[in-house]
Image (cartoon, rainbow, N blue to C red):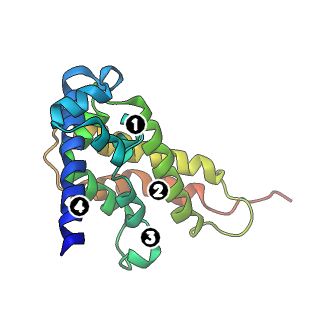
């Protein structure tokens, strides 16, 4: 029972801090937000902040591990697109993504998100690669798939408030990217 109470307090403190960060970002932009701004808005002490996070960047990146789980082969349902989980995550956390991917968000965050999604997509696409060279280097295919996922999902869909469901966004994403991915991952034909 005591552990549950502590866990609730930890979750509550982290959520207060995250909400305070997002509100400050929308008001001032990420670069101008300080730890003091965050703790003032959350109405917590500095020691509480540092008990949970190293700095504002650590707070910013907290929670992205859920995206890793979307690409875990053990967690995937056969025939289900792993990118659907990403769109579902974007949708469930729309307020966060609108603040982070929007005009006042952190370019640092977008770079981190890009690296994370590229790592996850690389792992997923590598399983689709044939032996030997492909028509397009795997890294180029990964960059294409990652940039499209971020641009279409976090920047266009959420920032512009496009009224599509996560499933519809995933279908749109796959319609746009799948032909290019398939073509890029074909075995390279070596002329005799």
Q: Earlier in the sequence, mark 3 or mark 2?
A: 3
Q: In terms of secondary structure, where does tag 3 sit?
A: loop
Q: Classify 10 Å Cα crowding around label 2: few (below 14), some (14-19), many (20 and above).
A: few
Q: Is residue 7 left or right of residue 137?
A: left
Counting residues from the N terminus, which is met first, the one under dot 1 or under dot 3? 1
- Residue hosting label 1: 55
The residue shown at (38%, 75%) is 76
Q: Distance of mark 4 from mark 3, alpha carbons?
A: 19 Å
- Mark 1 residue element: loop
Q: Mark 3 and mark 2: span between their CA atoms?
A: 24 Å
* Rendered image: mark on residue 167: 4
**In-image side of 139 versus 166 (left or right):** right
Q: If you read the primary sequence from the N terminus, does the residue marked by circle 4 or circle 3 appear first?
A: 3
Based on the displayed image, in which of its 4 quarters is residue 85 positioned? bottom left
Alpha-carbon span between mark 2 and mark 1? 42 Å
Instruction: Decide: is 41 above or below 144.
Output: above
Q: Nearer the viewer, mark 2 or mark 1?
A: 1
Tell me which label, 2 or 1, sits earlier in the chain.
Answer: 1
What crowding class fits label 1: few (fewer than 14 Cα within 10 Å), some (14-19), or many (20 or more)? few
Please identify the residue farthest to the right as the structure is shown. 192
Where does the image place residue 140, in percent across and percent down from the top left? 60, 46
Question: Which residue, given by chain and number where applicable, does mark 3 sit on?
Answer: 72
């Amino acid at each position: 029972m005591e552990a549950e109470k502590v866990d609730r307090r930890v979750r509550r403190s982290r959520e207060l801090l995250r909400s305070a960060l997002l509100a400050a970002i929308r008001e001032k932009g990420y670069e101008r937000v300080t730890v003091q701004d965050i703790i003032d808005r959350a109405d917590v002490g500095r020691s509480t902040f540092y008990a949970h996070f190293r700095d504002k960047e650590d707070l910013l990146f907290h929670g992205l591990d859920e995206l890793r789980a979307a690409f875990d082969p053990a967690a995937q349902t056969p025939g289900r697109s792993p990118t659907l989980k990403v769109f579902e995550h974007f949708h469930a956390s729309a307020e966060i993504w609108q603040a982070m991917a929007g005009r006042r968000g952190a370019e640092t965050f977008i770079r981190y998100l890009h690296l994370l999604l590229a790592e996850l997509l690389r792992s997923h696409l590598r399983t689709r690669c044939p032996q030997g060279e492909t028509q397009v280097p795997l890294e180029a295919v990964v960059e294409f798939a990652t940039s499209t996922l971020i641009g279409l999902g976090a920047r266009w869909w959420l920032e512009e408030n496009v009224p599509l469901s996560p499933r519809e966004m995933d279908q749109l994403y796959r319609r746009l990217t799948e032909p290019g991915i398939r073509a890029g991952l074909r075995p390279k034909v070596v002329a005799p």
